[in-house]
Image (cartoon, rainbow, N blue to C red):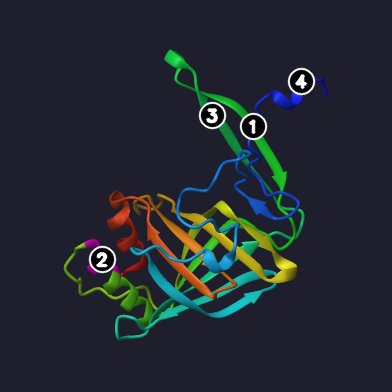
Amino acid sequence: MGLFDWLKPRTRTLGPTPEGLYGGLPKGARWLDGADPAGDPENFIPESEAYVFDIAEWRWGEQLWIDATTSSAGSQAGFGLVVGLSDGSNTDAAEVWEHNGSRGPILKERQEWTIPRGHPTRELVLVSHGEQTTQVLRKLEQCFGYAPFAHPALPDKNAVICELLMLRGIVIPDEDRFTARMKVVLPESDGWPYGEFFLNVNSVRKQLWVSEKSDEYRIAILDRISQR
């Protein structure tokens, strides 16, 4: 390393650090999107507009199984999550783009990394709990400002295949620590529209909450979990 190399700006590492930290920030920077999920887990709490669930079941093995439930609306509501985990040999990659005047966005570099054992891959499955998930559907319709449709949610144990992207957090399997803010992508396929939403997990407080990425994805979310 040259004498003044430490002064040069460094490209942010997109994969996890050896300590299990995702979304490393430049020196002196703070996480501004709500409470920092990589900080004190007791302070990583839902924002006021989030839809909050208790983690009723948590199984961290070859896959991470989560059952999320709430009775805040008077009826039991909930759904399941299955997160694909790395066996230590899975890899991931991301591209770093920058804007270059009239040339527009250009690819600066592509980063690849090995996902540590027990850490999430991009594989995520949303699992319907039948009537409980129908209650989730009714709540979302209300939050989105739509009149309730007559359609129920997908039948019990039916699933929706999604993609999971880690944004910020820390994952330490040996300590059962998984506090993270993530983005869930509903891919466009077989006539289903594209959609996104935020998923937040705090294994220390045993809470899970979802929040909106953009109102343009509302119909996509409702369609995907319903039998319409």
- The span from disc 1 to disc 3 (Cα, nearest Å) is 11 Å
Along the line of sight, which residue is nearer the eye, 174 or 35? 35
Reading the image, the residue beneath label 2 is 143
**Residue 130 x %, y %:** 38, 80
Measure how far apart labels 2 and 3 are at the Cα level: 35 Å
- Disc 4 residue crowd, few under 14, some 14–19, many 20+, Cα 10 Å: few
Give the residue type at disc 4.
Answer: Phe
SS under mark 2 = helix
Distance of mark 4 from mark 3, alpha carbons?
25 Å
Residue at the spot x=41%, y=51% of the render? 189
Category of crowding for the residue at label 1, using alpha-carbon neighbours closer than 10 angstroms: few (below 14), some (14–19), many (at least 20): few
Q: Nearer the viewer, mark 1 or mark 2?
A: 1
The reply to whether residue 157 is visible in this rendering is: no
Stretch in magenta = 140-144
Of callouts 1 and 2, which one flags the residue occurring earlier in the amino acid sequence? 1
* First in residue order: circle 4 vs circle 2: 4
Kind of element beneath mark 4: loop
Earlier along the polypeptide chain: callout 1 or callout 3? Answer: 1
- Residue 70 at x, y = what percent? 40, 80
**Mark in front: 1 vs 4:** 4
Tag nearer the camera, 4 or 3: 4
Q: Is residue 46 above or below residue 19?
A: below
Q: Earlier in the sequence, mark 2 or mark 3?
A: 3
138 is within the stretch colored magenta = no
In the picture, the disc for residue 4 is 4
Q: Secondary structure at mark 3?
A: strand
Among the two numbered marks 4 and 3 on one chain, the one whose residue lies closer to the N terminus: 4
Numbered mark located on residue 97 in the image: 3
